[in-house]
Structure formats: structure tokens, C-alpha cells
Amino acid sequence: MAVNIPGVILMVLFYLMVLGTGIWASFKSKREQKKSGASEMEMTLLGNRSINWVVGIFTMTATWVGGGFIVGTAEMVYTPSMGLTWAATMLTAYSLSFIICGLVFAKPLREMRCVTMMDPFHIKYGQVLTAGLSLASIFDDILWVVGTLICLGGTMSVVLDLPYTLCIWISAAVVIIYTLLGGLYSVAYTDIIQLVLIFISLWLCVPFVLMNPNCLDISKTLMNNTLHAPWIGAPGLEKTGIMMDDFLMFSLGSLGFQCLHQRTLAASSLATAKLSCFVAAFLILVFGTPPILLGAAAASTDWNLTSYGSPFPYERGEAAQVLPLTLQHLTPSFISIIGTGCVAAAVMSSADSDLISAASVFTSNIYKNILRPQASDREIQWVIRVAVMVVGLVGTSLTSQKNSVLLFWILIAEVAYVIIFPQLVCVLFVNISNGYGAVMGCVVGLVLRVLSGLPSLGLPVVLHFPGCVLEDGVYVQYAPVKTISMLSAIAAIVLFSYLTSVLFNKGLLPEKCDVFKVKVQQSARELTLVHGAKEDNEKETLDNTCPQTEASEPMISSEC
């Protein structure tokens, strides 16, 4: 097949439009910075905390609606062992993660005036432990970049017949350039263009695929399919534990990503942050419907009658590319090109989020707080640019056509769920938590998860939970091992934090052995409580003695 020239021209125009929007947003960012006098870090990483609700809704939705989301959902529906059941579980979980973020996490992080979600760790645990957790967060972001670029490379190489590597590097270059120029402003405003294109393109492709004569009625193949396994999946009763495990992993583990909290921190107010989360929770269901329909159509198609031929994609081991294959063989050429543009837009909308997310954590929590506390604004700006460049280049260089998008998707979610989420919950809501508990939480959670087995990484099952059975010579865990690991991590954090606090504060261990300064932390907490109580009493007295003044002169709210 020759190179699809019209498709290449359309993609070039699309890239130029996105790049132009990013450059325009970078100039807008510079004007806003001069007007407000904001620092380089605040402006680049958080948009001077002035993102309005319209832009906020788009950029919040784009946090999860990316290339991995679209291509991975279609792959999930097409895969017999997963199907609609798993896809619906994942979609509902991501929607719930937005709601929990708005209700539970937005307020405490904004009240602390955090730049990243790692700032509370620096305040409470110190530099060393924060650096370790920051590296875990950056690792997650790099893997996310890899997964999203794989989606685009696979789609463009199939539909446009361009070299896989060329597609990935050109796309990565565009994303890196506009993220370098404008930071979060460029990311947020390009998200608007990208989401509009995703919505139009996806829903335009669906009717052509479903009306293809080689595609059976998907309502009839949902439960009974003669061509392929029923696309409802295999939701057996024995898999209930696994499904609940995955649901909790996607809903709670998603809260361990910096890119999500970056949007709530960048909002112009707490109300704006919450509104963005709640609307995004609905919109993600809207954007998730077309990939489900496309995956169902792929499972209902007699591929022998198409230009693809036999055997079917699943038998050839090409389930990871089922979306581009569906666009290429079940739609007219111009529609498949538009669908490719949709995937490109989705990839950019998530890749730029991860680039700025990783750069935020490195710059604020490692470089600024640990390596160079005295760094100037100009120096910080260059560090952000270098970080974006390095993360983009590393992520792009790790892409491989053989890797499944679902593999990266699930691996990323597990790291966030087992390691980062328990730490974030405890540092924000468990007063007694300290560095010793945090270290043991990481160790316990990670060891339990590895011993439970990771088939996708070739790690066998060592620790057999109830329900673990031998299938085809391989042990399969039917217990919710991810959630068990996560809860064990939280329990370890609380338990060891309490034990070390007692040992040091009662003098059972010498203070010189207190690496994480638990005794100092306890004293500071008591002082804060006393000071807070005094402030509350003074405020109550003032409210009782000056009611008329309060009524005539509105108080300046300190709420973010």
C-alpha cells in the first residue's frame, strides 16, 4: 500500500493548527504574567491559578481522554476475556475518580497553596522521602507518555502507511514544542481544540463502521456471536473479585496522578475546581461510548470478507491495533483519515498533560526544594523546559510497536494505586503519619504486589491468596490482590508511624537516631493545634463583639 497523500496533508494541517494554538496560548501566558506579576513557576506550571471554568472543564476531561483511553477501550471491548463488562467498569471508575478528587482532595491541596501534590510530603516528611516518591510519580508520567505515543504510532502507520517511528517522533516533537513555549496555558487551550476534534471525529466514524455490510448487528452479537467471542466479555462469578479490584484501582489509583491535581490547583477558585471535576465525570462517559461501539463492531465483523482477510486480528495477535484496523478496513478512506486525526488529538491531549506534570514534580519538588532552593525565576524556567524535553525524549525512545496499550495502562495504574495513593491519603488525612511509616508503607505494598504475581511482566505467583487456582500450568489470582496490597500499605503507614512516634516521644529510642525528626514533628503539631485554638477563640470573640462591622464590611475570603 502506498503512502496516503491526502491523509498526510490533512495530518500536517491538523498539527499546524494545534501548534498554532499552543503558540498563541504561550503569548497569552506572557501577557497574563506581565499583568499579574506572577512568578515563572506559578505561571508555567499552574497558569497563575487563574484557569476559568470553561477551559478547566476541557483540560480536566482531557486528563483521562487520551490516546490510551480511546485505543485501549476499543482493545478492551474486542478482547474476549474483557469485553464490555471490563470497559464499563473502567469508564465508571474514571468518572468516579473525578468526583472523589473534587469532593475530597481539591480543598486540602488548595488550602496548602501546593504547586504539586508532592508538596505536603516535603512539608511533613522532608527532602529524601519526597524525592523518592517524586521519582515514582515521574516514572508514571513517562510510562503514560510511552503508552499514548504507541497508540498514535500504531494508528498512523496502519491508516497512512507511514513508518511507525516517524509518526511517533513527529507527533512527540509537536507536543514538546508547544508545551515548552507556553506551559500549562498552552496545554489547557490546545486541550479545547483537541477535545472538540475527538468528539466530532469519533462520532463521525461510528455510523460508517456500524453500517458496513461486513459488520453484524452488535445488539445480536453482544451475548451470542458466531464470528468472535461475545463482546460483553466473560463476567463470570469467579471474576467478581478481579473486577472489583480493577474498579478500585482505576477510581482510587487515578488520584495518585499529578496531572489530575494540577488541574484543581490551577483553577481560579475552589468552586471552579469542583465544577470542572463534576462536569468532567459526565463528559468522560460521553467520550468513552464511541470506542466501545467501535470495539463491539470489530468483534462483530467477518474479517474474511474485508480487505484484511483471515485470520482475524485477535488470532494474529493484533488486538492492540484493532481501532486503526477497524478504521482502515470498515470505513471509506477519508473517514479513516479523520479517525486518525481523532487519535492524534487524543494522544496530544494526554501526552502534553504528562509532560507538564512530570516537569512540575521534578522542578518544584526535586530541583527547587532539594537541589537549588536559591534558584532564580529565570533558572526555574529553563529547568522546566529541560525537564519537558527530557521526559518527552525518554518517553518517545521507549515506544515499541509490540507493546499493548493495555499493558502500559494497567502497569501505570498499579504504580499509582499501590504506592502513591496510600501515601497521599495518609499525608493529608492521617495526622500521626511520618517518614518511617511512609517507608514501610512503600515496602509492604510493593513486596505484597510483586509476590502476588504480575503475569504481564513475567513475575510468577509466590504468595497464594484464597481463590488462587492453577489454569493451564499458570497460577491465577482471583482475590483482589491490588486492593489488598494498597490497604496493607495504608495499614503499615499508620502502624509504623504510631510505633515510631511512641518510641521517640517517650524516650525509648535516642533522639539522635530520629532520622525523620518525629519528635520535632510532634512538637510542631502540638504548637499548631494550640495556635489554631487561640486563633479560633480570638475569631469567636471578635465575631461576638463586632457583629455590626461584619455585616457592613464583607470579610475577605481566604479560601482558594
Image: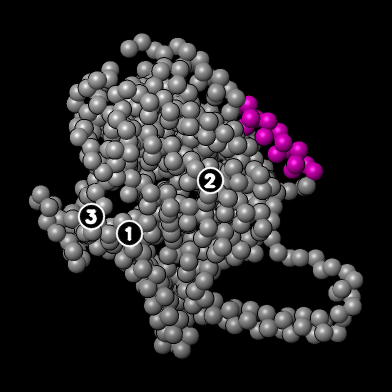
Work out whether 304 lies above or below 94. Answer: above
Determine whether, in the image, residue 247 is placed left or right of residue 476. right
Residue furthest left as drawn: 473
Part of the protein shown in magenta: 19-35
Q: Which residue is mark 3?
A: 236
Q: Which residue is mark 1?
A: 245
Cα separation, mark 1 vs mark 2, equals 24 Å
466 and 287: which is toward the camera: 287
Tag 1: residue type? Asp
Query: Which badge, 1 or 2, is on the more N-terminal residue?
Result: 1
Cβ atoms under marks 1 and 3 closer than 8 Å = no
Cβ atoms under marks 1 and 2 closer than 8 Å = no
Query: Which badge, 1 or 3, is on the more N-terminal residue?
Result: 3
Say few, some or many: other residues with alpha carbon within 10 Å of mark 3 (under 14 / 14 to 19 / 20 or more): few
Say few, some or many: other residues with alpha carbon within 10 Å of mark 2 (under 14 / 14 to 19 / 20 or more): some
Residue 283, labelled with which disc? 2
- Image coordinates for residue 370, horizontal then vertical, percent: 54, 57
Work out whether 289 lies above or below 337. Answer: below
State whether residue 307 appears in this view: yes
Provide the secondary structure element on which disc 3 rests: loop
Tag 2: residue type? Leu
State whether residue 520 appears in this view: no
